[in-house]
Image (cartoon, rainbow, N blue to C red):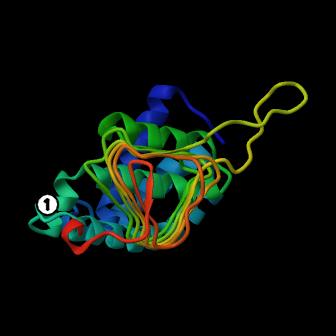
Amino acid sequence: MNMKSLKYTTAALNDMMDALKDLVFPEYAELSKEAATEIIRRSLSILAGNEIAEQFIEGIPEISRLMGTDVAAIKANDPAATDLQEVIFCYPAVKAILYYRTAHLLWNMKVRILPRMLTEFAHSATGIDIHPGAQIGAYFAIDHGTGTVIGETTIIGEHVTLYQGVTLGAKNFCYDKDGCPINIPRHPILEDWVTVYSNASLLGRITIGESSVIGGNVWLTHSVPAGSRILQGHHLDQISKEDC
């Protein structure tokens, strides 16, 4: 990777993301598709090389598709949202998820520093910290979001909703003979249609089964089966209709 100065790299990434927004949300674009694509190509070619730039451009339609599902999911989960434009313009989760999906594509191309920079830009702006190595499916919604942390080896299915302060983190680390931490899967797996409420901490390589609900302030370090309801440490088989 052709690393430039920090100031230059930051400026190039900001230009790239502004152009990418025009491609992902063309109904609100200032630039033409051709002009936005050229800015992305030029920025990434300088920072990561021509091959990475072209591979990334090929992946933009998938970023757009996924972001369309994410915006729809955020609106569907929030009765305060009046329309999709409000979600795109006003909701910090949209920025955090867009930067994550961009960074994740680069991460899968074995680029390392630029994806970390992108997600840290979003973290600084939104309070939402998503590692670019995390795997997140379609229709992903974060409501409010401040303080949300998603670790590197997290796997999230489709139609998953997280609220503010949720931590999907590691419980502990394994070390090699020299005392250095080993990068192995250590974060949770959330299957489809899982909802995690505010300030819950899910730690370790545990699996949260499909359609489960994890209540607020829960500290969870063990797997739970599909359809589970975990409320402040209590495992409930059902939630009454009055609680829904």
Provide the residue designation for mark 1.
86
**x, y percent for residue 213:** 39, 63
Quarter assignment of residue 143:
bottom left
Judging from the image, what secondary structure is the residue with disc 1 in? helix
The N terminus lies in quadrant: top right
Residue type, label 1: Glu
Q: Which is nearer the eye, 145 or 62?
A: 145
**x, y percent for residue 108:** 63, 58
- Give the residue displayed 17% in from the left and 52% down from the top: 90
Q: Which is nearer the eye, 229 or 110?
A: 229
**x, y percent for residue 96:** 36, 49
Tell me if mark 1 has few (under 14), some (14-19) or many (20+) residues whose alpha carbon lies within 10 angstroms of its own.
few
- Which residue appears farthest toward the right when viewing the image? 177
Q: Which is nearer the eye, 230 or 94?
A: 230
Q: Is residue 180 left or right of residue 24?
A: right
The C terminus lies in quadrant: bottom left
Quarter assignment of residue 13:
top left
Count of numbered marks: 1
**x, y percent for residue 32:** 28, 66
User: In the figure, 61 relative to 190: above or below?
Assistant: below
